Image: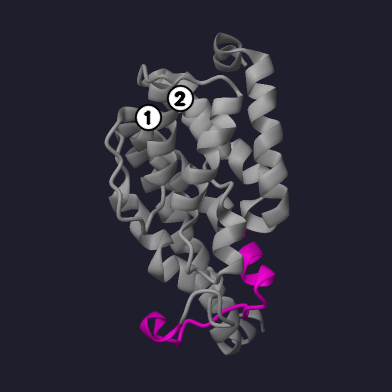
Amino acid sequence: MRQENSIGQHLIDQLRQVSEKFCREEGGSHGPDHSERVFQTAMAIGEAMAARVDILAAAALLHDIGRNKERTSRGKICHADKGAAMARPLLEQLGYCKDDIDAICHCIRAHRFRGKIHPKSLEAKILFDADKLDSIGAIGIGRAFLFAGQIGSRLHNPDVDPATTESYSTEDTAYREFQVKMSRVKGQMLTPIGQKIASRRHLFMERFFDQLNQEIYGITAQVKNAL
């Protein structure tokens, strides 16, 4: 890609190797394919908005390297904070200067939807949006079901109040993820490009879960209509 060539393919390859090592341990909805999609989205938005794509490339590829720590702690460890701490020595080894390391680590620390740190830089806002775009639409629905399968959750639980359920439990279904997180992403986007893409993906999710509810709970009507 043109963006990758402007940074240096060798450095991109090194970052990918580091990212894959950690993300492969996590696998599933936060495996290497997720980081690669976030990378591609962030680079595309970054180029369109004249951001520093060298900062974005490193932040996007390394943003989830702390995910395994969060999952194995059942959410007690924040993967964004942990990932930023893990990324710093890795970036030093790759030859990044202190200012760029600080900028990259801020992007990583601020990318979490439920995080307490708000993205300040343009690059951090773009990474936030790129990561969230991968959590909605058709991709987001697929990842939500994949994650639910990872933790042994149920297929669907629309009658359960999400306020009474816990993350990483058998009630942490794809629909719960839609109620708690995915349905809110559209209103959380920080760039105009992200906002437009998110609006389209949000409509698809609403249609999907309406259809899922009809197939599971409206079978009697479907049978009558089929006669």
Q: CA distance from mark 2 to mark 1?
A: 7 Å
Percent across and percent down for residue 48 are: 40, 20
Crowd tier of the residue under label 2, counting other residues whose Cα lies within 10 Å: few below 14, some 14–19, many 20 or above: many
Magenta residue check for 146 = yes
Which residue is label 2 attached to?
Answer: 55
Question: Dot 1, crowdedness within 10 Å: few (<14), some or many (≥20)?
Answer: many
Tell me which residue sits at (39%, 85%) in the image.
Answer: 161
Instruction: Give the magenta range.
Output: 142-165
Residue pictured at 63% horizontal, 22% vertical: 12
Position of 135 relative to 124 (above/below): below
- Please name whichever residue, 79 or 92, is drawn nearer the observer in this view of the structure: 92
Amino acid type at mark 1:
Glu
Check disc 2 and give the amino acid type.
Ile
The answer to whether residue 124 is visible is yes
Q: Is residue 16 left or right of residue 48?
A: right
Could you say where residue 72 lies in the image, as x and y percent from the top left?
61, 67
> Is residue 152 on the magenta stretch?
yes
Above or below, 137 relative to 165: above
Number of numbered discs on residues: 2
Q: Identify the residue under disc 1.
A: 123
Q: Is residue 11 left or right of residue 42?
A: right
Give the mark, 2 or 1, whose residue is nearer the N terminus: 2
